[in-house]
Amino acid sequence: MDRIPILKFGSALLVTIQVDMHDRLATALEEDLTAKIVEHNARGVLIDISALEIVDSFIGRMLDNIAAVSRILDADTVVVGMRPAVAITLVELGLSLTGVKTALNVERGMALIQGRLSESEADDADDED
Amino acid sequence: MPTTKTERLDIRQSDDVVRVRQLTRTYAVEVGLSLVDQTKIITAASELARNTLDYGGGGHVTVEALDQGGRRGVRLAFEDSGPGIADVEQALKDGFTSGKGMGLGLGGAKRLCNEFSIDSKPGLGTKVMIARWK
């Protein structure tokens, strides 16, 4: 079965969804990501959905699940690149993705994750004082 | 209502949901729907195709390009011969789900379209029609 590639980028994982996902592919991504977070000790997950023409309730739920599971595993999920028409449609559909952090593009998403990392490093430094 | 073009697709497996989205997109572009309206009808089609597969046990969709006196639109009719829906009013409410979904499928699809109708008979199947006009 096809898999969506997950790249390691520093202490974060980067996923770029470039295909129209069928449901099994979305479920596989959810499982693969969870395993990779643990394997790489990742602190952040960046999911680029700029190529997605639609996000329906299934994909929306997948994003919500990934965010919830990664939070429990101490990693932040940021979804980036959502197209404006997709955002409008999602809200009308009734999905507001309340559990998911979003950013306009990969750069800003990465900045969010880095920001959280340097905060926790600062906390660690405080603890040592 | 004059139909300018029509096509039928079987919905038997999860890849077919992707095919329904792609076919809907082709028709939506062809009748000249705006990008937001294209996105809305493709999303609605995706929800309904999944319902047909997961709850109806598979079925088919008929996609039509319409032209009503120069006003163009897309219409989709999903049909299955599954268990049907006992309480349609209830099924249209957000949060209603009999399975693995979020319960946004039917109600959400209705909100995303200009026209929506559902005809379901317990034990016989379900037919859902949606349309989006330019």
Image (cartoon, helix red, strand yellow):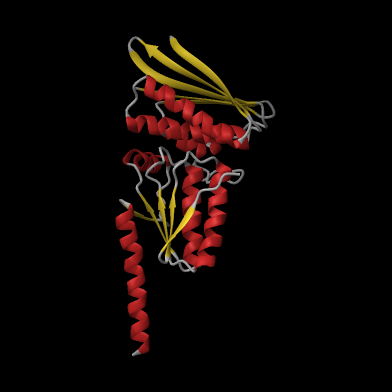
Judge whether residue A106 can be spotted in this image.
yes
Q: Residue at x 31, y 62 (%)?
A: A111
Q: How many marks?
A: 0
Residue most toward the bottom?
A: A129
Q: Nearer the viewer, residue B14 or A65?
A: B14
Above or below: residue A16 compared with residue B11: below
Q: Residue at x 34, y 60 (%)?
A: A110
Q: Is residue B101 left or right of residue A105?
A: right
Q: Is residue A40 left or right of residue B113?
A: right
Q: Is residue A24 left or right of residue B115?
A: right
Quarter holding the C terminus of chain A is bottom left
Q: Quadrant of residue A91?
A: top left
In percent of width and height, residue B56 lies at: 64, 32
Judge whether residue B88 can be spotted in this image.
no
In percent of width and height, residue B24 lies at: 46, 26
Quarter holding the N terminus of chain A is top right
Q: Residue at x 68, y 25 (%)?
A: B124
Residue most toward the right?
A: B123
In percent of width and height, residue A114 lies at: 34, 66
Q: Residue at x 55, y 19 (%)?
A: B8
Q: Nearer the viewer, residue B49 or A18?
A: A18
Above or below: residue A46 compared with residue B70: below
In percent of width and height, residue A9 lies at: 41, 61
Q: Is residue B12 left or right of residue A21?
A: right
